[in-house]
Image (cartoon, rainbow, N blue to C red):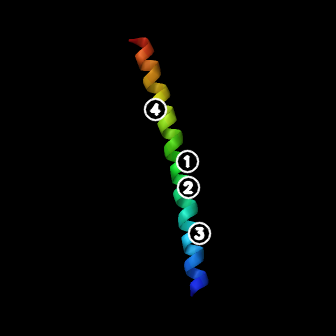
Amino acid sequence: EEKEAKLKEKAFIKEMEQNKRTVDKEQKRLEKELRKEQLRN
């Protein structure tokens, strides 16, 4: 029972970290796009 909870917690944390990386990547991409737009103007 305890083991099951620990595994679920680990999986959840791993998923959160992956989501964070995805969000970070997305933000960097958006910032790049914004900079391009600003350079054009």
Query: Could you say whether the residue bearing mark 3 is in a helix, strand or loop?
Result: helix
Residue at coordinates 54% horizontally, 40% vertically from top-left?
25
**Residue tagged 4:** 30
Query: In x, y percent, where is residue 6?
Result: 58, 77
Quarter of image, res 8: bottom right
Query: Could you say whether the residue bearing mark 2 is in a helix, strand or loop?
Result: helix
Q: CA distance from mark 3 to mark 1?
A: 17 Å
Please indicate whether residue 34 sits to the left or right of residue 5 in the image: left
* Disc number for residue 10: 3
* Disc number for residue 17: 2
Amino acid, disc 4: Leu
- Near mark 2 (Cα within 10 A), the count class, few <14, some 14-19 or many ≥20, is few
How many numbered badges does the structure rendering display?
4
Residue at coordinates 41% horizontally, 17% vertically from top-left?
38
**Residue tagged 1:** 21
Amino acid, disc 3: Lys
Q: CA distance from mark 2 to mark 3?
A: 11 Å
Q: CA distance from mark 2 to mark 4?
A: 20 Å
First in residue order: circle 1 vs circle 4: 1
Amino acid, disc 2: Glu
First in residue order: circle 2 vs circle 3: 3
Q: Do the numbered discs 1 and 2 sit on residues whose CB atoms are within 8 Å?
A: yes
Q: CA distance from mark 4 to mark 3?
A: 30 Å
Q: Is residue 32 above or below residue 14?
A: above
Q: CA distance from mark 1 to mark 4?
A: 14 Å
